[in-house]
Amino acid sequence: MESNVKLSRRNLLRSATVAGGILPLMGCERVISTFTREMGQTIPETVSVADGAEIDQVFHLLARAGYGPWPGDLCRVRSMGAENWMEEQFHPETIDDTLCDLRARRFETLHHEPGTCYEYKKPVLREEIARHTLLRAVYSKRQLFEVMVGFWTDHLNINIEKGDCIYLKPSDDRLVIRANALGKFRNLIRASATSPAMLVYLDGKENKKSGPDDVPNENYARELLELHTLGVHGGYTQKDVYETARCLTGWRLRTGWRKGTVYFDASLHDDGEKEILGQRIPAGGGQQDLDRVIDIVCSHPATARHISTKLIRRLVADDAPVSLVDRVAAVFSESDGDIKSLVRNILTSEEFKESRGAKIKRPFRFIVSSMRATGTDTHAHSPLIEYLARMGQGLFQHPTPDGYPDEPDSWMGTLLWRWNFAFALASNQVPSAEVSIEQLAKAIDKGRRGGTPAKLLPHFIGRAGSKRELDALEKYLAGRELHSNDGRVELIGLILASPAFQRY
Amino acid sequence: MSRSSRRGFLRNLFLASEQKMPDAGAKTLVCVFLRGGADMLNLVVPYGDDQYYSLRPSLSIPRPNGDDQSQDAAIRLDEFYAFHPKLRPLLPIYREGRLGIVQAVGSDNPTGSHFEAQDQMEHGEAYGRTIGGGWLGRYLRTRAGKNMTPLSGVAIGPTIPESLRSAPSASAIDSLEDVQIKTPSGDPRAVSLALSAMYGAEAGVLGQPGRATLELLNRVESLRGRAYIPESGADYPAGSFGAGLREIARLVKACVGLEVACIDLGGWDTHFFQGTTDGLQAGVIDELARGLSAFDTDLARHRDDVITIVITEFGRRIYENASLGTDHGRAFAFLAMGGRVKGGRVTGVWPGLEEEDSPGPGGLKVMFDYRSVLSEVLSASGCRNISQVFPGFKPQPIGLV
């Protein structure tokens, strides 16, 4: 294994040189597709499946701590051990992600400093951040990291259609969300508090005191307490919201030179004494007031409980088990909000093991897990992104600061578009997404052609099909040529459209 | 399964059993957007104001001559206003009181940019104050119960318009042909049966919506199976606008839970050779009038359940320009059609033809913020949370519906 990695790295470098040379001739994306396939981002010759009566525990882990297994992952993680895989995931910087980078790193709007994106047109910005997010989720080997990026993106939601957010979200994605996704909760909130995108989205930049009669703009302060930290029942009062807003006055965005960058204007700051959640903040704190606020709200016991509950809801079950919330909230307080410790405690809990198949995929997860399960080759062009909008989860499009909901009810009106996506993907009708059903079926069926429902279904759902599921699929196949490509393609489409694949 | 997740499971089961098919009596709001900034002054002609004729020596519509059938003169509505002759198909609807007009509606957008003004209006915002999402999207969100289906919000065309952004569920379709399972073999029936067998057996949160979606497909399938024949001899004009309205009428009658439908009609950006009773603009007016008239006829049995509004991003200048056209202006006449509309009259004070001197392009003075008009339309559609659709906005009563 070790020598393979070295060899492939050397190959990688050599091939990259070659690839660079022929790039202008072939078109960048085709080169990347060919190259990543050669380097192993493909369907292995044989793919083992889990076909017990219950969902396999390793499959379950890959489905929750990631976006579901890529063909071959199940076998790989079993042989390295689930604990080792998990530890590796907690240190994403140690996981080589070159192949994903090749697809996802080339969107230049994602790498700029805040403000530089004003040079780009909105459609370019909208498309690049969406493609980047989708490609990372599908191809990154740092799956847990991407799942956490998705979680914090909802938690600290920013709608890029509001104001100038579209110009500022790309750097928020990198410097707030990705920089802290598995770090300390306090650092994440501190970074978000002065993120240009957040200052626009929740009007923080308008929050100022320029005269004795000025009242603060409470928008951000309220959401900081209600959504980002303590939670709506976290025990704060309207006075706390007001006082928090006073502390946060004076943070501004430049409009001319260095447009979109943040500065603190002491002359617009309310420098009087404040009191938040029973703690006194003396007068004259200036911009230090912000850090005091962040310290107070992040170390509050209600925050430990609120964040733990939300994480458990995302990773375990919509109805977060109270026993687990108690334990994880304690870990939050002991570890000073160390996100890795929280997630580790959740993923190794009995409650997690018992929650197999209890959650319903949201559209983004449905699309990403479909593409991973089928080993899709995609560069995520806009038709693919449009499917998400049709299913109601346009990326960075949620209007209100609470982020896209976790509850399944919100997503049940657009099943038809899931089904159509399933058939379109399986039959290569999604522009810029290529699958090889034949190759996949062959790999699952140990080199034999075909692949019956009983053989294929477990690959997608991590357990044997129930009699009812298999009956439905067999009945569909009756009178149809299984070995014909249409029959097989529709069978995979049906599996992706089935209720079992909507669960995870 | 842990105790708590079992509780969740039971709760979901309970919720699922409460879910119903879309309410067959639901109200439908149809939004016709005239893209390009329509010169409504030549649709609802202020013939009683002499200045109109002096400012538009080549582009005015001649005064009514007492002959309702005339092709060369405006058709009298009252002492002051008259229809463009190509609006004749709407005359009976107006006279029967189902077509209402509000004069001098507009937004505070000073840019004169189509893109900016359309965006602002579709987002339902005041200038420079973004809320997030579109006004129809937010409206549907206030309605978001368990009855949302892919057909709750429908846009005719290839993309979902800005106004439907952030809707819980919306579809862009050209026709009902889109509402089907597209399978590689082209035999959706076998696939539907298999999905039916799988979703039919589902007790959890997926079961009911899965079955509802299949039911929806069945309904649409049975509609698609036979050719759609508009009722009462309704005759839709050729072209995508007529075809789109026809699909909307079909959806309304199919009781698939359609709450909002959006359709565009372009061709209104008449900077050059606008024409008068004939010519470029007369062509699109004809398409608009014949389309709306056919829609009204076709939906004769559903008039109380459907409101159709006609809106544009801005009106045009009062003066004609040197290339026999009109440039971007401000206010415009807003149209609403339906059984619940207090029609047969032009509401609102005529602001006169002195151009507005506020920032931005000149044109007819805005007397009503467009959101006031939309608020009334929304309340007629059963919206109880208008403040969530237009947060921070206080609508001015108009009396249109």
Image: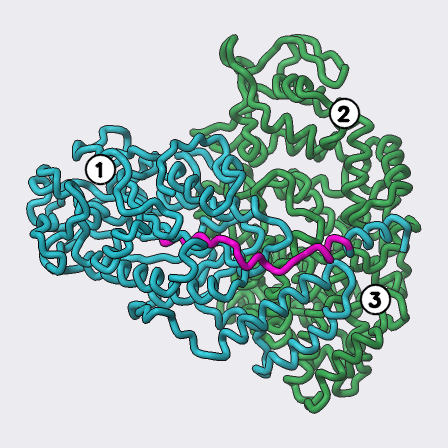
The stretch in magenta equals: B14-32
The amino acid type, in three-letter code, at marker 1 is Gly
**Same subunit, tags 2 and 1:** no
Residue A457 horizontal/vertical position (percent): 78, 74
Q: Nearer the viewer, residue A84 or B58?
A: B58
Residue B106 location, x and y as percent? 32, 39
Residue to which mark 3 is pinned: A74
Q: Residue at x 57, y 82 (%)?
A: B186
As helix, strand or loop, the secondary structure at mark 1 comes to loop
Residue A376 spot, x, y in % from top left = 66, 69
Q: Which chain is cyan?
A: B
Reply yes or no: does residue B31 show up in magenta. Answer: yes
Q: Is A234 on the left or on the right of B23, as rendered? A: right
The nearer-to-camera label among 3 and 2 is 2
Query: Which scheme is used to colour this image of the protein?
Result: by chain
Tag 3, which chain? A
Q: Is residue A284 above or below residue A425?
A: above
